[in-house]
Image (cartoon, helix red, strand yellow):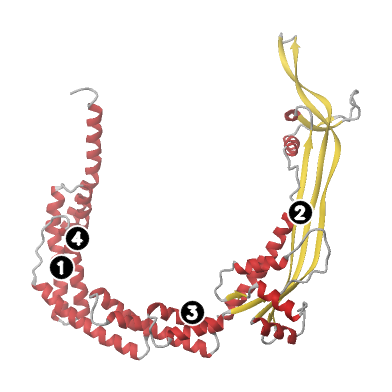
Amino acid sequence: MSLSLKPLLLLLLATALLACSPSRSFTKQGKKLATAGLHDEASLAFMQALGHDRANIDARVGLRLSGQQALNTYLDRFFRSHGQQQYKESVYAYRKADQFYVSVTALNIDLEFPPYYKQNYEEDLAIYLEGMYVEGQGHLKAKRFTEAEALFNEINTLRPGYKDVGNLKMMSKIIPAYVAGQLAFEAEQYRKAYNHFNDVFALNPNHEDVAALRRVAKERATLTIAVMPFENSLSYAYATNITSFVVSELSKANNEFLVLIDREHTDKIIKEQKFNLAFGSDEGSSMRVGELMGAKLILTGRLLDLGIINPELQQKEKTGYESYIEKVYNAEKKRTENITRYRKVMYTEFGGASSVRMKVQYQLINAETGKILLSDVFVEAERDEVAYISYDGNARNLFAGVWRSRNEIHSSDRVYQSFAEKRKVDELLSGKRDFRPMNNMLIDVQGRISSKLTQQVVQYEIQRGQ
């Protein structure tokens, strides 16, 4: 045998031994359990052994013996229940025996399972199914839908396709949902009614008049909103359009019960009617606008304040030091050494800030009654800062510090060499040098305000149906 093949053969042999080790361990465990008369548990151990090594003879012999003993025990339980006409216990005892038989025979182990047991099982199953079927119908008539559904589910598990159980099971879901929808509809809780009718429609779109009720409930539950232009009496160089942001956020809310009236339609009516719904208008004005636009809700608002600090960059000349290496001969050690020295320098530090602060108030009004449903004030701000150091020398060696004279040494001269001070200088050397565009900051502020406003409107819509 070549030397190159020996390591491979040794590896294969070691792998085989490792694979057999768990199989032998489970076989040993199975034998102990079988000796103790625990054939059910022993069978499980032998099956696990064969799962690791299908050729394990001891495990196969053990499973054949213990498996038959365990199966006989299961069949005895079934036969006793059958004789005593305990149909439920009989059915489930047989199914457990059959499940065990299938698991063992899948490993090519033959067990004796007399066919007359199956005949007895079918007899008991027929009686048990009929009993549950009648009981389930009774629950259905008595409107005990949860109990009925549980029985029909069990029947369907034991005998799929039994009589009209599939339809009865569906009815145990449809009827309570339909009734709940009717009650919610009568109580004018149209959103809740729609959800119930929608559940029924998904199960059977032809059930009674559910299609029509579902459609009407959806129409009545839907809130049509007219968003009026937000008032803005403030004058700034930067354009604001909070109304467009609000419309955009509401459009993205992904709520099927909130529908915005087309903006062009709204603007057209306002223009044609020469109507101006000012913030805080009376109930009559709101109702008039709602009637003209076909809106159930009117959303109005105004810009209360807009504070803007434009970018302004300031600069300061700062004293500092630049480190360098100087070679110095050490006479005592008789060698040249590198010594860190510091030369006095000047550098420029730049800094500045800009900010945007916006304050907006809004009202959500019931267009039919003029009642204010929601009202709030939002304040959002955005700030930007610029801070950096400009230095023409070797920036990597720049240190902060103080000195009085560039050419003379003074006792107050200091180089700030600490790690924290050096890190601060390095951060400023690579610091932010450009201000964010003010328009971008204004967009972010309006976006956050619109998002908060939309969340409140959506939450109102959701809560009204609960």
Q: How crowded is mark 1: few (under 14 residues within 10 Å), some or many (20 or more)?
A: some
Estimate the x, y position of residue 192 in percent, counting from the top left: 51, 81
Query: For mark 1, what is the residue?
Result: 73
Q: Residue at x 90, y 23 (%)?
A: 407
* Badge 1 or badge 3: first in the primary sequence: 1
Query: For mark 4, what is the residue?
Result: 103
Look at the numbered disc 3 and give the secondary structure of its residue: helix
Callout 3 amino acid: Asn
Task: Look at the numbered discs 2 and 1 and tell me whether their residues touch, using CB distance below 8 Å.
Answer: no
- Relative to 246, is 411 on the left or the right? right
Q: How crowded is mark 3: few (under 14 residues within 10 Å), some or many (20 or more)?
A: some
Counting every numbered tag in the picture gives 4
Q: How crowded is mark 4: few (under 14 residues within 10 Å), some or many (20 or more)?
A: few
Using the image as rendered, state which of residue 122 and residue 72 is in the foreground: 122
Estimate the x, y position of residue 193 in percent, counting from the top left: 50, 83
Task: Look at the numbered discs 4 and 3 and tell me whether their residues touch, using CB distance below 8 Å.
Answer: no
Task: Look at the numbered discs 1 and 3 and tell me whether their residues touch, using CB distance below 8 Å.
Answer: no
Callout 1 amino acid: Thr
Quarter of image, res 144: bottom left
Quarter of image, res 172: bottom left
Query: For mark 3, what is the residue?
Result: 195
Callout 2 amino acid: Met
* Badge 4 or badge 1: first in the primary sequence: 1
Query: For mark 2, what is the residue?
Result: 438
* Badge 2 or badge 1: first in the primary sequence: 1
